[in-house]
Image (cartoon, rainbow, N blue to C red):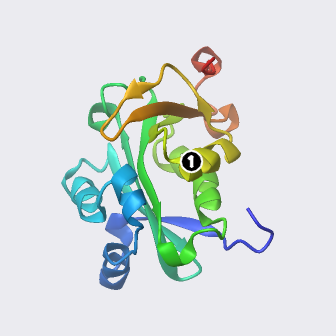
Amino acid sequence: MTADAPLATLVEWRALDAAGRDAARRLEIDAAQIEFAGAMARSIAACEAGDPTQVAGLAIRAGEEIVGWVLLKRDGAAPDWANDGAAVVSGLRIDLRHQGQGIGTTALAALPRWIACHWPTTTRLALRVDDGNEAGIRAYEKAGWIEVGERRMGRVGIERTLALALSPASHPDHDITADRLVPHE
């Protein structure tokens, strides 16, 4: 993240006004990123249809502008591969006009704080990333995520599973020492 990277804040889909929702729908996402993360319309539909205690669509705002999107899932809404206590990051997307500014990195840094406030029993964040998504892998690793488990065949190729243990300070009523992550060898 550069010293002048805009601060990224996370705003829940249900809290956005009509203009904010329209801005999220109009994000310009690179075709390769859509291949890895899926279409915005599908992600927004999952957010709208999901139980808000288990699915959260978060617009990424830099200043007053919506510049990205991320979908979080947990408990029954999370994929079968997710461990208990994990919230799964599903398709982080940054608008083409705002990539390379550190916004994705600041959004990733904001996720643990959002989780601590809204889903405080969550002990880790997890995701699967396609092996060919080099920019995504770099961004996640830069934010402290580590590869865990075995690589598996996914929708468009080999996928890596990455995870980020959440700080015990963020969860004072939950001891996560038993939930330590084991890096992929």
Residue 99 left/right relative to 84: right
Residue 118 left/right relative to 147: left
Q: Quadrant of the N terminus?
A: bottom right
Residue drawn at the location 65% of the way across and 18% of the way down: 177
Q: Position of residue 184 (x, y in %)?
A: 60, 20
Between 141 and 36, the one lying in front of the other is 36
Residue drawn at the location 67% of the way across and 46% of the way down: 143
Where is mark 1, residue-wise? 134
Between 5 and 56, the one lying in front of the other is 5
Between 140 and 13, the one lying in front of the other is 140
Can residue 82 be seen here? no
Q: Position of residue 63 (x, y in %)?
A: 59, 80
Q: Is residue 143 above or below residue 163?
A: below
Residue drawn at the location 81% of the way across and 69% of the way down: 3
Q: Secondary structure at mark 1?
A: helix
The crowd level at tag 1 (other Cα within 10 Å; few <14, some 14-19, many 20+) is few
Residue drawn at the location 34% of the way across and 85% of the way down: 19
